[in-house]
Amino acid sequence: MTRSYCWIQETDMLYKGDTLYLDWLEDGIAELVFDAPGSVNKLDTATVASLGHALDVLEKQSDLKGLLLRSEKAAFIVGADITEFLSLFLVPEEQLSQWLHFANSVFNRLEDLPVPTISAVNGYALGGGCECVLATDYRLATPDLRIGLPETKLGIMPGFGGSVRLPRLLGADSALEIIAAGKDVGADQALKIGLVDGVVAAEKLRDGALAILRQAMNGDLDWKAKRQPKLEPLKLSKIEAAMSFTIAKGMVAQTAGKHYPAPITAVKTIEAAARLGREEALVLENKSFVPLAHTNEARALVGIFLNDQYVKAKAKKLTKDVETPKHAAVLGAGIMGGGIAYQSAWKGVPVVMKDISDKSLTLGMTEAAKLLNKQLERGKIDGLKLAGVISTIQPTLEYSGFDRVDVVVEAVVENPKVKKAVLAETESKVRPDTVLASNTSTIPISELASVLQRPENFCGMHFFNPVHRMPLVEVIRGEKTSDNTIAKVVAWASKMGKTPIVVNDCPGFFVNRVLFPYFAGFSQLLRDGADFRKVDKVMEKQFGWPMGPAYLLDVVGIDTAHHAQAVMAAGFPQRMQKDYRDAIDALFDANRFGQKNGLGFWRYKDDSKGKPKKEEDAAVDSLLADVSQSKRDFSDEEIIARMMIPMVNEVVRCLEEGIIASPAEADMALVYGLGFPPFHGGAFRWLDTIGSAKYLDIAQQYQHLGPLYEVPAGLRDKARHNEAYYPQVEPARPVGALKTA
C-alpha cells in the first residue's frame, strides 16, 4: 500500500526522503520542500512519516530561526492519498486511532517549533494539504490557490487537526461552512476570511514568504500571538455558539440528510471541542473520525472518488493519439440540441446548430442564451464573455458550415426512420473523416448505421437531460464503429466537461437498459396494489434516490417512457415483454404525459420561480384502479427489494455480456447518469456491501414475480462463494509500520 521509505542523510542537505527534503536557505532559515515522484504531492502515510523524520532533524538545530514550507510541484499538496483510504479504513478502530494520534503529533510538532513558520502555497492545498499549512503560523498564496477540506464528501471528516485549527483561525461560521460542505475556496476568498495572509504572483511567492518570515524573526510581526489562538478554546460567547452551531446543524440536515453522517458529525465535534484546548480537541476529532471511517457510506464515497479517477484516466488514455474536435455541429435544435450547443460553445468548441424550422432554432438559441444568462447572474462571466460564447453558436436551416466540422451529433426526434434519413443526408454533406454520432436514448446504433456509407465513422453519443447539469455521456460503439471514431467523440465529450463512458451496443445501451427493469418493478408493484406515493417516498427517503419512480417518470415524460418501454420489450422480449396493461399505459392513454403537460402521476403547477411543483391529483387513483388490484400495504424493505432487484440483475447482465466493461464504469454511469445514491456507491458497490450470498437469498424470495427477478448465472456463482465484484482490499499495515514507512 505504501512505498518503502528511504531516509538518506546527505552532507549538503539536512534531510532527504522520497517525497520531501529539508535544507538550509540562509541566516538560520530552513526550507522544507514537498517534492514527490510524479506530477503531484500527496500527504500519504509515507510522507507523514517522512515529515516526522524531518522534524526530528529540525528540533536538533540550535541555530534554527525560521522555517519555510513550499512545494516543487504546480500544486502544494493535493490531499491525502485516497488510494490508501480503503485499506486504512479496514484496520481495527484502535489501530486507526493510534495512526491518527501519531499523525497529529507530527503536525503538533510542526506547530510547536520554537521559531516562526510559513507555508508558501501554490495551486491546490486540499484535505491533508490544507491541514498541513494550518499548522504553520503564516500562509502566503498564489492567485491560482484552491484550499479547503473536502473530507465530508468522502464520508469522513478532517483527521489531521483541520476541525480544530480552522475554526480557531477563521471563526466558527466560515470554518463550519467549509468543513460541513466539503468546500474549497480560491485565493481572494481565502484572503478575505483569513485563511491566508497574502496573495502574490507565483514568481514572487518564495521571496514574499521569506520576507514575512524575516519580519517575524526580527520582531516586526508577533508570530507567537498569531499561533496562540490555535492552541486555545474557540473564542465564542454562549449565544454566538448557540447561533452558529444551530444554524450549521439545520443547514446540514437540509442539504446532507440522514444518509450522509459525516457533515453532522463534523459540526457536532467542532461544537463539543469549542471549549477545549488543542490537545483535548484533537482527541475528540480522533474519536469522531474513526467510526466514520468504518461506515459503508465512507467506503462507498471513497469508492466513487477512485472510480471517477479510473474512468477519467481511461478516457485520457483512449484519446492520447487523437486531436480534440475544433468545430462541431448539432442536428436538431430545441431544448436538448440547445443544451448540447451551449455546453460545447461554453467549453470552447464552436457549433453549427441545424434544424428544419425557424421555431426550433429559436427554441435552441433561447435555451443556450438562458443558460449563459444564468452564468452571468452568478458572476461567472461578464457581458462580453456571454456575447463571445453565443456568437460561436451558428443557427442554420441549411448545411452551411458543415464542411468545416469534425464531429456532428444528431438530436432529432426518437424515431428510427427520421434519424436514418437525417444521418444519411448529413453524411453526404460533411468531409469523409467527419464523425457522426446519434443522441438516441434507446435505438441500437448498428440499426441506425445500416443506412450509412461510412458506418465506421458513426457511434452513439447519449447525453442526459438537462445537458448542462448531468455529467455522464454514454459513448456507444456499434458493430462497425472504429476506435478512432470512439476516441474523437470521447475527446469532444471530455472537452465539454463531461464524463464519457464507452459502452457496447444493445437496445437502451447501458443506462436505459437497466432503468426500464426498475420501472417494470414499479409497474408490478402498482399492479399488485401498492400506492405510488408510498413507493416514491420509500425510494427517496429510505433508499436515497433524488426522485421516486413516479416522479422520475413524470420528469422523463410518460409518452417518452411508453415509447422506450416498447423498444426495450422488443429488444429483450423474454424479460421485458409484459402481458398486462400497466400504469404507464393508463396514463399515456389519458394524455397525462408528466411535467411537459402538467399532468402525470402528479399534477404540476409552476412556483414563484417558474419551476414545476408537484401536487396530488385524485384523478390518478381512478385511472390506476383499472390496472391495479385492490390497495394493500407493502413494507419499506419489500418495496426496495421489488424496485432494486430487477435493476441490479440487469446491471450484472450488462457486465456479463460485455455491454459495460467494469463494475467501476457501471457504478459511475449509474451515479452520473441516473442519480444512483452516492452513499451506496453504485449497484456493484451496493451489492458488495450486502454480500452476494445475502443478495441471492433476498432475490429468491421474489423470483415468482417473473424473469426480471431471476438472478443471472454469474451472480449466482459469486453467491456460492460469497465473492465480491470489486477487488478485495487488504487492511493497512500495523500502525507501528506506518509510523516508520
Image (cartoon, grey):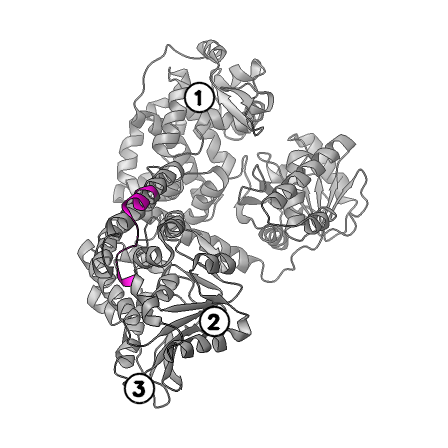
Tag 1 or tag 2, which sits nearer the N-term?
Answer: 2
Q: Which residue is mark 3?
A: 63
Q: Which residues are magenta?
A: 230-243
Task: Kindly report the distance in space between the C-alpha atoms of the residues bearing marks 2 and 1.
Answer: 55 Å
Q: Is residue 332 visible?
A: no
363 and 186: which is toward the camera:
186
Q: Are marks 3 and 1 in contact (CB under 8 Å)?
A: no
Residue 438 vs 581, above or below: the answer is below
Q: Which mark is residue 547?
A: none
Q: Which residue is mark 1?
A: 523
State which tag comes first along the sequence, 3 or 1: 3
Look at discs 3 and 2 and give the one toward the viewer: 3
Q: Which residue is mark 2?
A: 73
Q: Position of residue 356 (x, y in %)?
A: 77, 33
Crowd around label 3: few <14 · some 14–19 · many ≥20 (10 Å): few
Mark found first going from the N terminus, 3 or 2: 3
For label 1, the SS is: helix
For mark 3, give the secondary structure: loop
Residue 486: x and y in percent read: 60, 51
Is the C terminus in the top left, top right, bottom left or bottom right quadrant?
bottom left
Residue 93 in the magenta stretch? The answer is no
Q: Say what secondary structure mark 2 lies in.
A: loop
* 658 left or right, relative to 16: right
Q: Amino acid type of disc 3?
A: Asp
Q: What kind of residue is marked 2? A: Lys
Q: Nearer the viewer, residue 486 or 310?
A: 310
